Amino acid sequence: MRKHVLMYGLLCGALIAVLRAIQYRWLVVEYSVEIYGGLVAAVFASVGIWLGLKLTRHTETVIVREVMVAAPVTFIRDENKLASLAITPRELEILELIAAGLSNKEIADRVFVSENTVKTHSSRIFDKLGARRRTQAVQLAKEFRLIP
């Protein structure tokens, strides 16, 4: 009995597979123009996108030129402004190093203090100058003639 059920199941499976193959062949034959047209359209679209990206790709050329501008030889620090802002010599030294473009870590290594100490000095300088950022502090210090 099991043999018959197994045989019946296999024959039904084979019949379903044959019917699906016939349906697939009928589908391909019936709609072959649409299928081929879709494939050709997909190929042309992908080639067009690739070609468009290839032809319109802009290569940016960045030219960097370093210009060294010497500080004026006749720089005179405004000691009155320095005293009115109550900037200490260490804070002035930190401010000059900030103006030189050094990071907090580089400044700490150069003046032999911790990075947190540099941050503390920087925040005090910012408060005294009324600045929010390093660049603004440097700009204000130059306007006040504290640094060259």
Image (spheres, grey):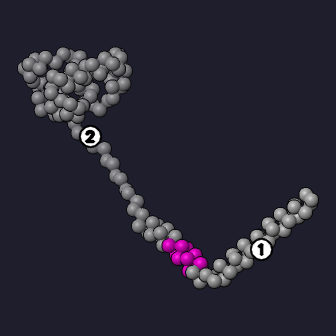
Q: Is residue 73 visible?
A: no
Residue at 12% x, 32% y: name it: 143
Where does the image place residue 62, in percent across and percent down from the top left?
Answer: 35, 53
**Quadrant of the drawing holding the N terminus:** bottom right
Quadrant housing residue 5: bottom right
**Of residues 101 and 75, which is closer to you in this image?**
101
**Quadrant of the drawing holding the C terminus:** top left
In the image, what residue type sits under mark 1? Val
Q: Is residue 44 magenta?
A: yes
Is 36 placed left or right of 50 in the picture?
A: right
Question: What kind of element bears circle 2?
Answer: loop
Q: Dot 2, crowdedness within 10 Å: few (<14), some or many (≥20)?
A: few
Is 139 placed left or right of 47 in the picture?
A: left
**Of residues 106 and 22, which is closer to you in this image?**
22
Where does the image place residue 141, in percent across and percent down from the top left?
Answer: 16, 29
Residue at 55% x, 77% y: name it: 38
Where does the image place residue 40, in percent across and percent down from the top left?
Answer: 56, 78
Q: Which mark is residue 68?
A: 2
In the image, what residue type sits under mark 2? Met
Image height of 126 relative to 6, above or below: above
Residue at 65% x, 79% y: name it: 27
Quadrant housing residue 119: top left
Span of residues in magenta = 35-45
Q: Which mark is residue 18?
A: 1
